[in-house]
Amino acid sequence: MQLRNELVRVEADRTGTTIDNLKRAFLENLYYVQGKPPALATLNDYYMALAHTVRDRIMQRWNNSAITYTENQSRTVCYLSAEFLMGPHLGNNLINLGLYEPMKQAIDELGINFDELIEEEGEPGLGNGGLGRLAACYLDSLAALEIPTMGYGIRYEFGIFKQDIRDGWQVEITDKWLRNGNPWELARPEWTVSIPFGGHTESYRNSQGVYRARWVPAWEVKGVPYDTPTLGYKVNTANTLRLWKAEAPESFDFQAFNTGDYYGAVNAKVVSENITKVLYPNDDEIQGKVLRLQQQFFFVSCSLQDMIRIMKGQKIPMERFHEKFAVQLNDTHPAIAVAELMRLLVDQEFLGWDEAWAITQNTLAYTNHTLLPEALERWQIDLFRDLLPRHLEIIYEINQRFMDDVRVKFIDDDARLARMSLIDESGERYVRMANLACVGSHAINGVAALHSELLKQTVLKDFYEYSPEKFSNKTNGVTPRRFMVLSNPRLTQLITDRIGSGWITDLEQLRQLEQFIDDPAFCQQWRSIKQAIKQDLADSIQKDYGVDVSIDSIFDIQVKRIHEYKRQHLNLLHIITLYNRIKANPNIDITPRTFLFGGKAAPGYFMAKLMIKLVSAVSEVINRDPDVRGRIKVVFLKNYNVKFAQHVYPAADLSEQISTAGKEASGTGNMKFAMNGALTIGTLDGANVEIMEQAGEENFFLFGLTAEEVRERKARGYDPKAYYNANPNLQLVIDRIASGFFSHGDKTLFQPIVDNLMQSDPYLLFADYQSYVECQDRVAEAYRDQDKWTRMSILNAARMGMFSSDRSIQEYCDDIWNVKPVTVKETEGFCSAT
Ligand code: Z16
């Protein structure tokens, strides 16, 4: 049956955008969706009514996008990621709809505080850090550039834990983000798929008498899609983020009915629903747990089956899969897609191996996000076979053919064969997911220029030598809609007043700001905006932590996951150095600073948790020592997340990007700080290299060893004690920590950190200490000349154009995906406005 077109109307209350329409719509949603008269409404009710008012205004775009893509059979990007760290939706959707100001006016006119409603929204914390946030920025840019896109991932019931700090220690609290309902998603149970697990394989003869393989799984779960629209900035494009939730198949219930084992059936239900219960909270490290492999296969199989359903719905022959879809693998987390797409094409769609393999390679592309050896995913063979017996067979088959090719290209090189094999056979046997991703993809990329070079020289060297044409760099970017327009309205206004609003979708236009660096009025405005934003953050620090921080001090900020390679403890060594100077000479003239830290430690990462405790311990001593006279303050800001990040970046004077060179693949916080006018103190690591190139060396505080020097130093045999013995300031800092000075006399508490640095110092803090402190002294000096600092700040922002995720996505579209924009018209489809 088919609904008659003219019966469908889009009502003004659902789509109208006059102030009056918006007010009426809000009140209607409060009444009819939340089911509350104003007298009984809570803050959450108001938030929900507002969210529905916004959602209603998304629907026409979303439906029209779906219709347009279906009718045109548009080539579609599928971004497969185990993490999407979207951040709060409300403000962002209003910005992208161009309705932020009218909605604010409407809500304020109703006597409700709009900003409070924006703050009321929690966030779906479905990611750990950089990788998940990158996926979210990319969805924003893909929609802004009008590229048909599906984001595919996992609808974790519990996202990244909420962090509390008790007695200076991190405490993890489960993140029940769905507790109050989620107005931004729609369940699509009609597109549920079935996911097999376990069991065995067998061969059978088909009707033509040809032998084929068959997987006889032992159990299955259902994958139910939940869709969230992702809007483009001021265009009609509304793409879809499709996240899969695991549910038990109904057959469990029938089994219980038949056998009387009610408990067993309910228990089986719990086990299958466990698959999407919780996000693994490790950034840059793997755990090798079977549940994690279940999660990966689950969302990959759901997504690929969904693509096949779409192909069939549009009557596109399966041979053209790679023409319809470009599938990007966000790290190796979805790398099982190589084997799963082969299985679906060969076992289910009955394509020949060679044809299926060509389709698979042409469809898939792989982004690597790390060089850290502990982050390279591999699965024990036995564990893998128990869960995915057919995939192991397929991987063996791929490997046999691949090894034959390598053998011909590199004659008599068994060591190379062993390194490139999809199976690690050096000891206990493992499936190597990075090797699988490389072999099954037509394109492989790193996430910053340095990172992509190092990939070719180190972890993926053999694959580069085998197929250099697959490799490229795609330097990360961030969306200026969320990280400038939404989070920094004051700066946005100032910039737009001077150069118009074109920069929001063409960030290189920020260069026009350079013409104002000698305009005193502009510089003064720039500076007073920064001061006003710092005051807002200072107020919230006063309120939440009872610490009084001065907006005339340097806001020196390090926010990111806590990790030894990111070296939050190097930052601390500098803070303690300043403190020691004050203690030695209380009247010393130092530039006042506020040191802010934020970030989560993986719950099982002992050293990272101890680093948080050390920040807390140092802050307690310094903040209350009368000799300091408030000239330095240290605060650990708890539960750092996207929502809070939006308040932090705009308030920063100095951005700490101090990882050991060669360890941070790219970094993206570094970009968000710089485009909001913070100066960077950093090493030549990840995208810092390109940030400095763009900003100009004279506008960047560079210190430390290069990646090359780090490698040499380690090869020569690095001895941290030599640095300790030669540097009295460093000695004093380490001795202070070791003496129990920051731990109420307890000499054992921080001993693991001290011992680690003294004995091995794997991230070369001691080698970079002197260079870092001297660089910080240059920062302090520079801040004293406020006019000069402001000019540097403006130049940093003006020159960050290349770090828009629009630029990154344009490169992916041109070089890897070969996909073009599809314009969605406003009135297309069967809806017409009244
Ligand atoms: C992650 O966030 C990153 C790498 C990785 O292997 C796993 C996770 Cl969860 C980060 C990188 O550490 C960071 O340098 C990079 O900017 C980010 O991914 C996005 O590419």
Image (spheres, grey):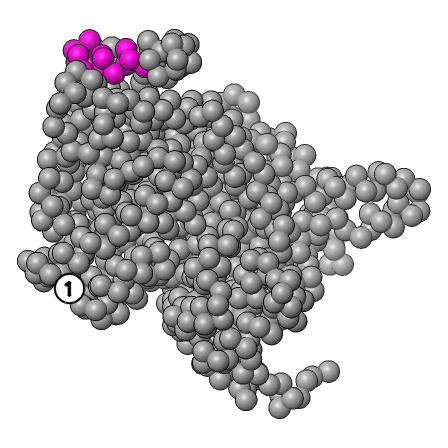
Residue 262 shown in magenta: no
Relative to 723, residue 306 above or below = below
Image quadrant holding the C terminus, namely: bottom right
Please give left or right for residue 160 compared with residue 672 in the image: right
Q: Position of residue 120 (x, y in %)?
A: 50, 54
Image quadrant holding the N terminus, namely: bottom right
Q: Position of residue 497 (x, y in %)?
A: 21, 69
Relative to 528, residue 722 above or below = above
Q: Position of residue 134 (x, y in %)?
A: 40, 50
User: For this rendering, which residue is in front, 770 or 174?
Assistant: 174
Looking at the image, which residue sits at the far left?
518
Look at the image and give the residue range highlighted in magenta.
Answer: 722-737
User: For this rendering, which residue is in front, 528 or 319?
Assistant: 528
Residue 726 shown in magenta: yes
Residue at which label 1 appears: 512
Residue kind at label 1, given as amino acid type: Gln
Question: Principal SS element in the magenta part?
Answer: helix
Residue pictured at 87% horizontal, 46% vertical: 255
Element carrying mark 1: helix
Evaluate whether residue 281 shows in this view: yes
Residue 455: name its quadrant: top left
Disc 1 packing (10 Å; few <14; some 14–19; many ≥20): some
User: For this rendering, which residue is in front, 280 or 455?
Assistant: 280
